[in-house]
Amino acid sequence: MDRDILKAFLENHEVTPSYIFDTDVLCSRIQQIQNILEDKAAVCYAMKANPFLVQALSGIVDKFEVCSPGEFRICERNGADMSKVVLSGVYKNPMDTIRTVEVYGDKITYTVESRTQFELLKECAVKTGKKLPILIRLNCGGNQFGVDRETLEEIVRKETTCKYLRIKGIQMFSGTQKKKLRQIEQELQMLDAYCTELMEKYGFYVQELEYGPGLYVSYFTNEEDESETQLLELKRILEGMRFRGEITLEMGRFIAAGCGTYVTSVVDIKEIEGRRICIVNGGINHVNYYGQTMAMRTPRVEQMPDRNGETDKYMVYGALCTTGDLLLKQFPLTDVRLGDVLVFHDIGAYSVTESMYLFLSRDLPSVYLYSEDTGFELVRPARPTDVLNAIR
């Protein structure tokens, strides 16, 4: 986020700790992805990365990956186009699933991650008289997600002509933060060949591949932003595929990370045995960068306001009563004072939902959306968590 915009925010809001999500930056990121990939793939936003962005993305992404009843309700409240929803997740609650099918039917695409899920969706389809479009998730890596090839092929062999479910294709996601695109190329080549194999063995035509590439996000100060290079290389890989059905790229972190800023205030400064220590009113209950452990790597952080004077290195801790609440190690601060603000950049993905919010019963940070057209909009005020951590 632009420093002048942040300065205006800090001058006019009682703010810290707070998240600010810049929807102009978010839309620019989507535009970059779509411009480079052209018509080679549709873009699906995995809303678990940051559900506060659903409304802003509703008109510009092709699909939303939704992995829980709670995420689905967020889509409903935000007026999302349900024809864009891919209802995923390793556990589909039967009550929620039948309600979803009754209300939205074949407007939604459903994933199958087990034989049990297949039978559940078939039962829901029979009850409602709707023929539901499904994607079968192919396991990658031996984890809990999806089904193995044997199960996938059994479903394809036995159920292709099922009058209640329409098998559209395959979904696969193998991980995040892939530094080498060679892994992505190998996975897409495997899927390309597998689609041909399914046609040859079973006469099954894969209409759609939904694939999570897990493109790398550069979070730390010693890294360069290689997003454009990655997208150009991904486009090359897609152009080399024989598959001519619809390809959907499911991304969360790569879309959302850069739009987020977190601000937290300095609340104490001290020195212990020659080590300068700075305490802020946030902490690891709000800040979570993938790949950062005990501040061994430094994200992009700046101090506000600008100050002239002596610069010293500080250990920056949050407000939690644990030695693990170390945000920055030997971080340079200039003439730091109580009330100064530390601004953490590239925090648009996962921190807002993935951090350890209930620890020590501290308040949830406030959340703001920003765009040049509308300015700052408070979408969630700071909220207490003690009510969740006690009998009364």
Image: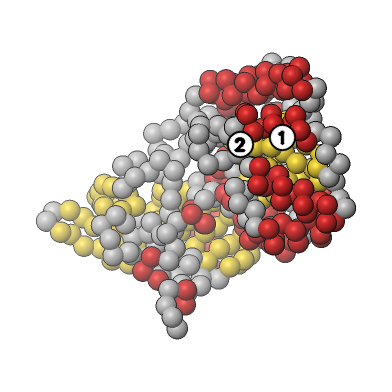
The residue lying at 42 percent from left, 78 percent from top is 390
Type of amino acid under label 1:
Ile
- Closest to the camera, between mark 1 and mark 2, is 1
The mark nearer the N terminus, 1 or 2, is: 2
State the residue position of label 2: 147
Q: Dot 1 lies on which element?
A: helix
Q: Between 158 and 171, which is closer to the camera in this rendering?
A: 158
The residue lying at 53 percent from left, 29 percent from top is 226
Residue 68 horizontal/vertical position (percent): 63, 55
The residue lying at 21 percent from left, 62 percent from top is 270
Q: Dot 2 lies on which element?
A: loop
Residue 167 to residue 202: above or below: below
Q: In which quarter of the image is the C terminus?
A: bottom left
Disc 1, disc 2: CB below 8 Å? yes
Q: Can residue 158 be seen in the rendering of this structure?
A: yes
State the residue position of label 1: 155
Type of amino acid under label 2:
Val
Q: Label 1 neighbourhood size at 10 Å, few (<14), some (14-19), many (20+)?
A: some
Residue 101 horizontal/vertical position (percent): 79, 56
Residue 67 to residue 205: above or below: below
- In the image, is 28 to the left or to the right of 161? left
- Mark 1 and mark 2: Cα distance apart in space: 10 Å
